[in-house]
Amino acid sequence: QVQVAESGGGLVQPGGRLTLSCSCSGSFFEVVTVAWYRQVLGRPRELVAEITRRGTINYGGAVKGRFTISRDNAKSTVALQMNSLNPEDTGVYYCRIGGAGPWDYWGQGTQVTVSS
């Protein structure tokens, strides 16, 4: 059974930074797109950032210029460096491994709260 686990969430003040990390136990990690999504209460889940197997990166408009996604295929991990956080970034952040092929796995989510 494939395990996907996020870590690194927490409470941070506006203007602060956090780094999220996600690990995957699947051997297919290096051939799939990996991504971070977030969900705010009452709103649909939205794409934060994704990185393809070839390293192509896409960011959601709200985080462009502030967040950085990266992957380490050797360790089967994906990270999300979040800078200049604001209260609108508050939500549950989910890691997604795959999606367009036979593999599509989600983590349980990690809470990020930006508040003074």
Image: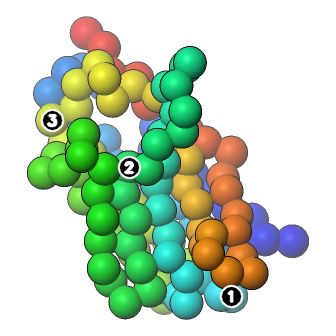
Residue 57: x and y, percent? 29, 71
Find residue 42 and report its image quarter. Answer: top right
Q: Which of 87 and 115 is in front in this view?
A: 87
Q: In which quarter of the image is the C terminus?
A: top left
Residue 66: x and y, percent? 16, 47
Residue 40: x and y, percent? 49, 25
Q: Nearer the viewer, mark 1 or mark 2?
A: 2
- Please identify the residue farthest to the right as the structure is shown: 1
Residue holding disc 2:
48
Query: What secondary structure is found at the residue carrying circle 3?
Result: loop
- In the displayed structure, 87 sits above or below 66; it is above
Residue 92 in view of the camera: no
Q: What residue type is labelled 1?
A: Ser
- Decide which of tag 1 and tag 3 comes sooner along the chain: 1
- Please identify the residue farthest to the top as the structure is shown: 116
Residue holding disc 3:
84
Residue holding disc 1:
27
- Decide which of tag 3 and tag 2 comes sooner along the chain: 2
Q: In which quarter of the image is the N terminus?
A: bottom right
- Disc 1 versus disc 2: distance between alpha carbons? 24 Å
